[in-house]
Image (tube, rainbow, N blue to C red):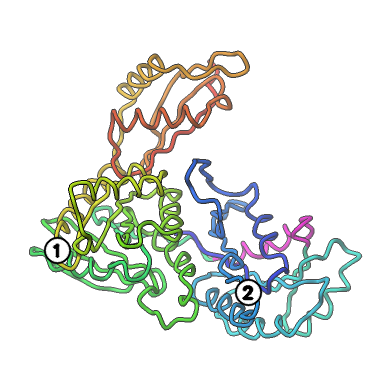
Amino acid sequence: MKTLIAIVGRPNVGKSTLFNRIAGGRKAIVYDEPGVTRDRNYAEVIWERSAFTLIDTGGFEPVSKDRIFIQMREQCQLAMEEADAVLFVMDGKEGLTPSDREIADILRRLNKPVFYIVNKIDGPHKEEKVFEFYELGVERLFSISAEHGYGLNEMMDEVIEVLPGEIEAEGDEVTTRVAMLGRPNVGKSSLINRILGYKRVIVDEAPGTTRDSIDTRFERDGKKYNLIDTAGIRRKSRISLRLEKYSIVEGLRTIDRCQVALLLLDPEEGVTDQDARIGGFIHEKGKGCIIVVNKWDLVEKDSQTIVEFEKKIHDELKYLSYAPILFISALTGKRVKKVLDTIDQVAEEAEKRIPTSPLNKALEGWVKRVPPPTYRTRQVKMNYMTQVSVAPPTFNIYTNFPEGIHFSYERYLLNQMRGAFGFTGVPIRIHFRKKRKG
């Protein structure tokens, strides 16, 4: 699990600009697929061989201007609870403000690295604007221009030096780690309790490695599982979690730790924007996914109800079209056993490897059936295909023109792969590489 850096500060001091400057060009993996939400407030970043998750807390702010001080406290609270390091951004043009002092007082009590940053310093000739910020009593200030990149590399060198090493997820390969994800009151706890109520279950509840997460380990029919409840969701008294969007940060850490994610939906509310965001995170992080529609016992049904609801889910979550959809009632226990059976199936699919010979034989047939479009009047050839990793299953296809592969043809290949080899519940990654010479 990657370490997490949070950017905090007043509105309009340049937090988002700094976020984009750090993430731009250094994102580890970005999947440009239709349907994935683009209103990002986080990024997976690699900087000088160090990997971390960057959070722009500005993306969590309500728009109401009359709650500005509450917003600042909530941002700092978020940083205190979740981040491994904090970048506190102030405005060098505006100067030190009472709001900056208040934030600094809160951050000063953190038992973790805090970097005090004076932004909008466009060069050495503007450095005198930094002096008044030393009134905060901090030993080191970083003067930067997020817009132009001035001072950024020096600051990031210091940040990387103090970051903890990447936190490893549990290495027990025989234990399937399952994340319970979804908005409040969709029935995550009820589902956990119902699962643990089954016979032949041995339960061991213990704190997780993520802050405030609850790990519940159990066995069923000789198979070991670890249910990871979304960190912090149960503690509704926490200030930062009064706003629903804050659960995204909690969810990110939980998704990092799991192999299979259960995305729970409420049938009365359907797929909300929050559900779509969480689903996008699951997909982008390459985790197995099962969509679980809970409280199905409360829905008035006819012969077409399930079909119509599945269509709504597929319309709203196109990028999770590979995820099985289960309709259950945690309250009555109906179809809950199917959840565990499907977890087993998806976990197995995520680790599946396809031998090279049948893979290339299949590729030859797909290309013959539907040849790739030409690129600049040149024929695009698919020379060779091999699987390079699992969880998620990842494949390299060697071609003469990697840049000539349109996303629509990539989607065609993905659909063919699923038809031939399954991979139920897991995303497939295809990378197009230049044909090797010789």
428 or 39, nearer to the observer: 39
In the rendered view, does 136 fall on the left or right side of 402?
A: right
In the rendered view, does 376 fall on the left or right side of 321?
A: right
Q: Locate residue 358, reporting x and y percent.
A: 30, 22
Q: Residue furthest left?
A: 199
- Residue at mark 2: 114
Residue located at (48% from left, 33% from top): 431
Q: Locate residue 259, reporting x and y percent.
A: 33, 53
- Residue at mark 1: 333
Q: Residue furthest right?
A: 125
* First along the sequence among labels 1 and 2: 2
Magenta stretch, residue numbers: 145-163
Dot 2, crowdedness within 10 Å: few (<14), some or many (≥20)? many
Dot 1, crowdedness within 10 Å: few (<14), some or many (≥20)? some
In the rendered view, does 353 fall on the left or right side of 104?
A: left
Amino acid under disc 2: Val
Amino acid under disc 1: Gly
